[in-house]
Image (tube, helix red, strand yellow):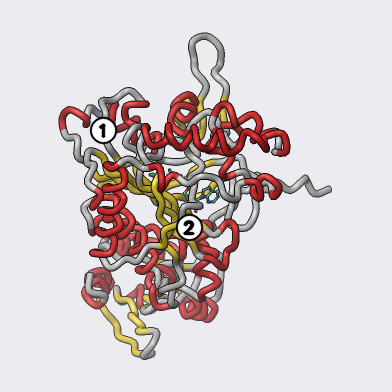
Amino acid sequence: MAREAHRAPRGTRDLLPEDLILIRHLERTAHRVARSARYSEIRPPLIEETRLFARSLGETSDVVEKEMFTVPGRGGSDSSYTLRPEGTAGAARAYVQGGFPIRAPFQKWYYLGPMFRYERPQKGRERQFTQFGVEAFGSRDPRLDAEVVDLAVRFFEALGFGSELQVRVNTMGDEEDRGRWREALRAFFAPTLGERCDDCRARFERNVFRLLDCKVAGCRERNQGAPELLGLLGSDSAAHHRAFLSALRALGREPIEDPGIVRGLDYYTRTIFEIHYPPLGSRSALCGGGRYDGLIEEVGGPPTPAVGFAIGFSATELALGELGLPPAADLADLRAELGAEVYCVAITDQEREETLALAGELRRAGLTGVELDFRGKSAKAQFKEAGRLGARFALVLGPEERAEGVVVLRDMAERREERIPRAEAAAALAARLGR
Ligand code: HAM
């Protein structure tokens, strides 16, 4: 009887060789775009102490309340660990732990890798997903906010996106602005609190801003006409916002000002933004980010301003699929890597060990995509396989060639053959392939 077949956990997927053609293209585009503005890669651990996320993202954020993959501590003083649901908290922790606030406070970093959130899986939302994020520490300059937005947009442009994308921007103000806003919101929500959902009632006391992004339809209706922060901004925050918008325009970006953006994580101050592909509907955000001038202090460092974004690959892949992007030519080199460049053909079984040795020599000489047969195929079938894999050359060994110490080099496209000394095969091929 067949055993039970196992499946990948809900909300996760296998990235198999074919899937990785697109993913690797996204990754190399991310590396290129980040490096264009001198951001350097970091790789913090995938797990952090749970309390880091509770502190940074906020106890009342959906992510901390409901979506963390947490491994309890194993007794004693061992704390609990959580698979990172996002990259900003870990980057901020690494910045402080690495001593950067003192020795080199201005840092531009980026990261690329898996994040984990225990969400209900749906279109574009997974429990394990990839983010490309950047974080710039040590400057309050609103031009840096604009540079960060511009980088995110350039990532999408490099993938072939055009005017389909919307850059939506807003401001969260600073601590004082938010104090005024908090009071105004409380006064506005208090009279209808009894008609709202349980989550909203609980959050009214702890974090009234969260009522603004409640997903329950009835609660959303009751948010109509809620006071907006824009009118309550102090002069510094208002000036920052104006300078940010002006810097964005200087970069040729026309943002949509959208007071409806409220990011789900608590660390934001002043600039916030999202990049949307509207046809994806309510889950259309491909990217989210903003300034977080209080976070470094929150995780134990000195007051240090910072700004960043994270782009989710899942939604990006969906949007690319709908747009028929990227053009096949952009993926041609990665697709070719799945094929072979050189195929070593054994005419009879007597040459099979020799073709293995030959393949080893070619690989040592720096050739890539060197393949041979391991399944007992006839010589004819080996040629066919070489063609199927897109090999440019076949190196053929038969009893005669062996006796004479030569190999036959066949150019697969031109069907031209020449005999070359066995000892020179690797160098001859490397030269022909420009290695
Ligand atoms: P976020 O808005 O929570 O921000 O996530 C950024 C992007 O990650 C989203 O726009 C979405 O594309 C993607 N994403 C989030 N959750 C999922 C999921 N379950 N499945 C698939 N994709 C998802 C942050 O994470 C902040 N750390 C961004 C940031 C960096 N702010 C400042 N620096």
Q: Please state which amino acid type lies under the numbered disc 1.
A: Thr
Residue at 32% of width from left, 30% of height from top? 296
Which residue is found at the position 39% from the left and 84% from the top? Answer: 412
To which residue does mark 2 refer? Answer: 286
Q: Which residue is mark 1?
A: 304
Q: Position of residue 349 (x, y in %)?
A: 50, 69
- The amino acid on which the numbered mark 2 sits, given as a three-letter code, is Leu
The front one of 235 and 122 is 235
Residue plotted at (32% across, 66% down): 253
Q: Under 8 Å from ligand 1: the CB of mark 2?
A: yes
Nearer to us in this view, 397 or 101: 101
- In the displayed structure, 88 sits above or below 79; it is below
Q: Quadrant of the C terminus?
A: bottom left
* Ligand 1 closer than 8 Å to label 1 CB: no
Callout 2: 10 Å neighbours few (<14), some, many (20+)? many
Instruction: Please report the residue visible at 17 percent of the width from the left and 28 percent of the height from the top.
Output: 102
Left or right: residue 51 compared with residue 143: right
